[in-house]
Image (spheres, grey):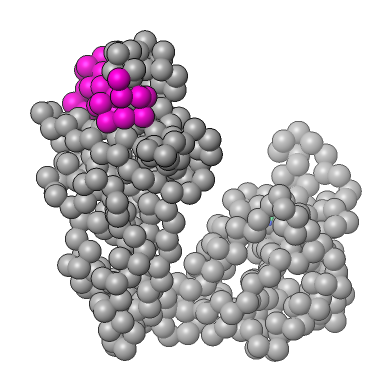
Amino acid sequence: MNACILAVGSEMLTPFRVDTNSLIVTERLNQIGFDVRLKAVVADHVDELRRVVEGALAWADVIVITGGLGPTEDDITRDAVAAVLGVPLDVDEAIVDRIRTRFARRGMTMPEINRRQGMVPRGAVVLENANGTAPGLWVEHGQTAIVLLPGPPREMTPMLDAVICDRLASRAGTRCLFRRVLRITGRTESDVDAAAQPVYSTWATRSVPITTTILAALGQIELHLTAAAASKAEADAALDAATAEMQAVLGVSIYSTDGRPLEAVIGDMLRERHMTIAVAESCSGGLLASRLTDVPGSSAYVERGVVCYSNTSKTELVGVPPSLIDAHGAVSEPVAKAMAEGIRGRAGTDIGIGITGIAGPDGGTPEKPVGTVAIAVVVGDTVRVRTFPFIGPRDMVKFQSAQAAMNMLRLILLKSDAPFWPSKSRD
Ligand code: ATP
Ligand code: MG
């Protein structure tokens, strides 16, 4: 069963807005066995949308269109779909009444322009919108179902879920797609692929076939496993087995098998161990503290984080002796260690982390090029300090710094001797 997704809105054809609805729609359609073959962003232009829908009708079993159902002149989805079907738009007074009531509840009078949202291509089924004024619409043309949903994601998503259960699941194929995301750090993409390829290459021909995609960024690799199965239970069994096979070859470098980010994994580890953490950051500018505190409930283990960017602040805030900075430079293992120990001593936590480096693009030297970052992690009596040769632009150096610091902590807590990071880092 083939699907086409259209995001309507000229704003998404500028450099300032992206279509995210289609990602949610794709996920839900895949789960009930639709294969998304085409998605497109279409301008707020009746003829453009009409042409694209007409093209998709030739091959798609379902066309999901989001956006352009508002009350203004540039909201043209209803008009374009009516034109494709060759039917008139009728005003549905029941919809207009519901919109009028919605306004009245907020002590407002419905502007006349909102009557447009009550216009329905003749023969269409109205889909309720619990979170906004624009109703959705379901129409059929030959074998193809066309679903119109409003643009705002918080309105669109619950309506999509309802239409998936009610109307689309029964039209879908017998095999549905289910995904699992394995997240990996501390290895390069080519290293991961070399280890993983012999394993996943055998999956495509199994009774529940699994396809694998590698998505790699600096310091972060994801393996997306997609199983095609008749039921969720069957897919889960196949994905559990595949995950175990992958863990057997990639070991602790897989830090999560359910898509959770590293900071959430660290959070669980600290909570289980009843440990607390404080961090002192220079080149990462607070990103480590920010990521640690992205996790709900992190107040149970995050005591504090300080950004000590200047040399003076390293001394004032975490007690790094000026003589140490003079002797080794601010970007050095002794200073990283003094930062980790200093913040831990002041905060009274179990764990201290210090990060100091050169994020670039300026400030590099031949012995300490841009991307050189020293990280120290102190846990109990264990002190580990490493200098990493990160690559990429400033934001990526910051990301890798936070990522490597968390991975060092994770591997120390797991008492693992796996390398903290790939390649030339002195490990
Ligand atoms: P409304 O009644 O709110 O006008 P609508 O169906 O006309 O509903 P649009 O006007 O097209 O929706 O979009 C409203 C807002 O919804 C946009 O400003 C944008 O923030 C968001 N939006 C629309 N389409 C998308 C999309 N494909 N992905 C993400 N956000 C979207
Ligand atoms: Mg719009």
**Is residue 416 positioned above or below 169 on the image?**
above
**Is residue 4 positioned above or below 162 on the image?**
below
Asked whether 352 or 357 is in front, the reply is 357
x then y, percent, for residue 12: 72, 57
Q: Is residue 349 magenta?
A: yes
Region rendered in magenta: 327-351
**Is residue 365 positioned above or below 66 on the image?**
above
In the image as oriented, which residue stretches furthest toward the front?
Answer: 366
Determine which quarter of the picture holds residue 9.
bottom right
Determine which quarter of the picture holds residue 208.
bottom left
Q: Could you tell me if residue 129 is visible in this image?
A: no
Residue at point 37%, 24% (across, down)? 330
Residue at point 76%, 33% (across, down)? 107
7 left or right, relative to 183: right
Residue at point 15%, 46% (across, down)? 414
x then y, percent, for residue 268: 25, 42
Asked whether 119 or 28 is in front, the reply is 28
**Is residue 176 positioned above or below 23 on the image?**
below
Determine which quarter of the picture holds residue 93.
bottom right
x then y, percent, for residue 124: 73, 73
x then y, percent, for residue 280: 34, 25
